[in-house]
């Protein structure tokens, strides 16, 4: 079973966007383009991640494989349902 000590960062630019990295390697190997889009990483937590660890939006095995292959795992925000998008639009006319 693969286990890795991971540090998780959140993006100050986009809600619910997280970056998982190996704690020992840190952010040193992150591509510049990724960090420009992500913003200055804000530390959230450190987690011992194993393949059987349940995560909310990803399979732990996928996260571990991505960290092994590219040095990080980027968790994108969930897609918003179309009916929820109306909550983020400013009303153009009052309807009562």
Image (cartoon, rainbow, N blue to C red):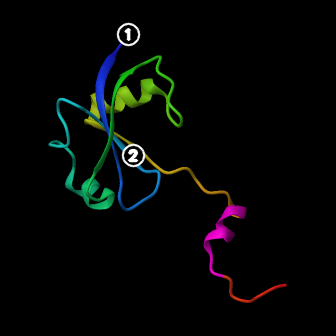
* 86 part of magenta stretch: yes
Q: Is residue 36 above or below residue 52?
A: below
Q: Secondary structure at mark 2?
A: strand
For marks 1 and 2, the one nearer the N-term is 1
* 64 part of magenta stretch: no
Question: Which residue is drawn at the image coordinates 28% and 54% (left, top)?
Answer: 34
Along the viewing direction, whichever of 32 and 15 lies nearer the viewer: 15
Q: Position of residue 38 (x, y in %)?
A: 32, 56
In space, the residues marked 1 and 2 are separated at their CA atoms by: 24 Å
Question: Which residue is drawn at the image coordinates 29% and 59% (left, top)?
Answer: 39
The residue that label 1 is drawn on is 1
Q: Secondary structure at mark 1?
A: loop
Q: Which mark is residue 9?
A: none
Q: Going by the image, does 61 lie left or right of 44?
A: right
Q: Quadrant of residue 43?
A: top left
Q: Quadrant of residue 83?
A: bottom right
- The magenta region covers 83-90
Q: Is residue 47 above or below residue 19?
A: above
Q: Quadrant of residue 40?
A: bottom left
Within 10 Å of disc 1 (Cα), the crowding (few <14, some 14-19, many 20+) is few
Q: Quadrant of the C terminus?
A: bottom right
Question: Which residue is drawn at the image coordinates 63% and 80% (left, top)?
Answer: 90
Q: Position of residue 32 (x, y in %)?
A: 20, 55
**Extreme-right residue of the structure:** 96
């Amino acid at each position: 079973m693969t286990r890795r000590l991971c540090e998780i960062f959140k993006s100050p630019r986009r809600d619910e966007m997280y970056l998982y990295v190996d704690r020992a390697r840190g952010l040193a190997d992150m591509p510049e383009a990724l960090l420009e889009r992500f913003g200055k990483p804000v530390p959230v937590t450190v987690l011992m991640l194993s393949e059987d660890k349940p995560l909310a939006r990803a399979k732990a095995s996928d996260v571990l494989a991505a960290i092994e292959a590219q040095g990080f795992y980027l968790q994108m925000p969930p897609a918003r349902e179309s009916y929820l998008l109306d909550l983020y639009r400013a009303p153009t006319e009052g309807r009562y």
